[in-house]
Image: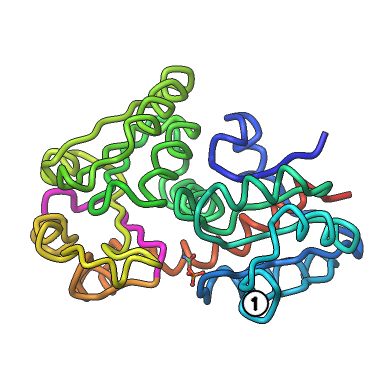
Amino acid sequence: MIRHFLRDDDLTPAEQEQVLTMAPGTVGGKAVAVIFEKPSLRTRVSFEVGIAQLGGIPVIVDARSTHFGRGESMADAARALSRYVDAIVIRTFEDTRIAELADYATVPVINALTDGFHPCQLLADLMTVRQHLGSTAGKTLAYLGDGANNMANSYLLGGATAGMHVRIAAPTAFAPDPVIVSRAGEIAAATGGSVKVTVDPWEAVAGCDVVATDTWTSMGQEDDGIDRITPFLPYQINGALLKEVPNAIVLHCLPAHRGEEITDEVMDGPQSVVFDQTENRLHAQKALLSFLIGQ
Ligand code: CP
């Protein structure tokens, strides 16, 4: 059976643990298409380098120079690409697009960020938590900011899968999708984790081990006319907030809008592990590719 990785709960807790702890193997000359319908720095470079380091052939595709932009269906693209490559990694918009690609592909499809989820980032984040705190199970992660974006969804599902206590603090208008919260709660009930949603950033952070945030304006939302600054100001990760949790580590998937969701003093301060987190994109994705298509 072909295994896809479209959202965080596509890996069971045991499989997630396996990916987070395995030494990457080889993909032995297999080709992997890595398609971008949105901009990227970290994802593009980490996949290209990682596939090459595994002995594979990375094929980077900028969707603007293909037929995606002029309406070729995901179904047709999936069937064509499956004749050339052994896996398809894609960054795209609506989750219905990657779902259609996966439905028609005859090779594994990996989500490199959609509007709904960023599961490869979550693997890197969980790897970083293990690196700095020894384990994920039983640790408390507080995510502050846009609770309705892909990182919040992935923290809910991926964090719960890892047995973490996931707290989301967001303004009411940017609260997480109740369907995702419910699914995360189901997973957490089986892994010993928990899920909490609040509007109070101080309540979320109290006693936590990990503080995480993401940009308040996700890709594609730049011109939607919604005020994405004022409602989020109480959720900024700054020095005053971190005084409450001097031993917590700080995550940001990057790119950051310094001075908005996170201050310079935090990004560049002693609690920040954001560049370890960035590096772990490479290691986590190599492990995921080894798990899905390795030999
Ligand atoms: N974190 C992340 O996905 O970065 P890029 O958008 O640069 O790929």
Figure quadrant of residue 31: bottom right
- Examine the rendered structure and indicate whether residue 246 appears above or below residue 43: above
Q: Would you name the residue on which mark 1 appears?
A: 62
Q: Position of residue 267 (x, y in %)?
A: 28, 70
> Horizontally, is 31 left or right of 143 in the view?
right
Q: Nearer the viewer, residue 182 or 17?
A: 182
Q: Secondary structure at mark 1?
A: strand
Q: Nearer the viewer, residue 127 or 108?
A: 108
Q: Quadrant of the N terminus?
A: top right
The residue positioned farthest toward the front in the image shown: 71
Q: Position of residue 163 (x, y in %)?
A: 45, 30
The residue positioned farthest toward the top in the image shown: 190
Picture residue at 74% right of the left edge, 58% below the top: 88
- Examine the rendered structure and indicate whether residue 78 appears above or below residue 227: above
State the extent of the magenta-drawn residues as a range: 242-254
Q: How many marks?
A: 1
Q: Position of residue 120 (x, y in %)?
A: 56, 53
Residue 83 belongs to magenta span:
no
Figure quadrant of residue 155: top left
Q: Position of residue 201 (x, y in %)?
A: 14, 46
Figure quadrant of residue 83: bottom right
> Horizontally, is 259 left or right of 83 in the view?
left
Picture residue at 23% right of the left edge, 54% below the top: 145
Whether the residue under disc 1 has CB within 8 Å of ligand 1:
no
Q: Nearer the viewer, residue 5 or 226?
A: 226
- Callout 1: few (<14), some (14-19), or many (20+) C-alpha neighbours within 10 Å? some
The majority secondary structure of the magenta stretch comes to loop
Picture residue at 66% right of the left edge, 47% below the top: 100
Please, what is the three-letter code of the amino acid marked with disc 1? Asp
- Examine the rendered structure and indicate whether residue 176 appears above or below residue 265: above
Picture residue at 28% right of the left edge, 74% below the top: 257
Colouring chosen for the image of the structure:
rainbow
